Image: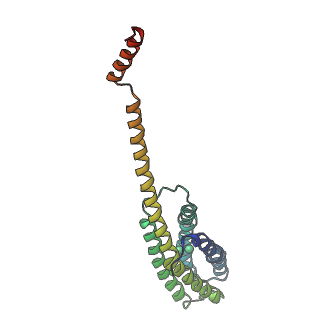
Amino acid sequence: MTLEKRDIPARIDHVLETHHALLHKELPRIAAAAADSGAPEFQEVWSEFSGFVAEHLMKEEHMLFPTAKAMVAGEDVYVTNLDGPMNQMASEHEQIHALCDRVRASLEVGDGAAGERDAVLALLADLAVHAGLEDDELFPAISALAEEAAVAQEQREVAARASMADKIREMEDARPTHEGKRARLKKALGGLFGR
Ligand SMILES: [Fe+2]
Ligand SMILES: [Fe+2]
């Protein structure tokens, strides 16, 4: 589904308030529960998964999403290309999917997630919906927005160069030329001597 430009901020807020908020709540809670009840295999995988996801959330929350919102608001964000960051986010999603598989596998080992099995599976299911929403709707819409912003910026730069060239021409035209000075002097002298 194509996401309209005007709908991007609301979709970002939805992702933050539902999917990101759930991860911020559950990642540390499940880590603490696993630590309390002793599930070393699960704890190790969870710690790696949790660290990677938390860093990914931070990049979206502090860089990508504020930039996208500023672009929608028409703020003068300096954007040349968001392809690099967008590709990185998509590749991080791939890594997150692989880590989810390892978390799922670790549920079968030893004490599993020590009573948190259902909560872990629910969180992974929510994460799959979350990543799908970003991959299929939000990221393509933000990429299109960045392209639009880059074109607008190029146009502003061209207009600024043209206006600078106009100002230089005006200054040159306004500068009294040698011929002009002679003509004015002749006219003034003609007035004095009645000619
Ligand atoms: Fe996200
Ligand atoms: Fe993401």
Q: How is the image coloured?
A: rainbow
Q: Quadrant of the C terminus?
A: top left
- In depth, the one of 170 and 1 nearer the eye is 170
Question: Does the image show residue 41?
Answer: no
Looking at the image, which residue is at 46% across and 74% down? 90
Left or right of 141 in this view: 18: right
Q: Position of residue 141 (x, y in %)?
A: 50, 72
Vertical position of residue 106 compared to residue 190: above or below: below
Q: Position of residue 18 (x, y in %)?
A: 65, 77
- In depth, the one of 12 and 111 nearer the eye is 12
* Residue 179, image quadrant: top left
Vertical position of residue 63 compared to residue 113: above or below: above
Left or right of 140 in this view: 195: left
Looking at the image, which residue is at 48% across and 55% down? 78
Looking at the image, which residue is at 52% across and 72% down? 52
Q: Position of residue 176 (x, y in %)?
A: 38, 25
Left or right of 17 in this view: 49: left
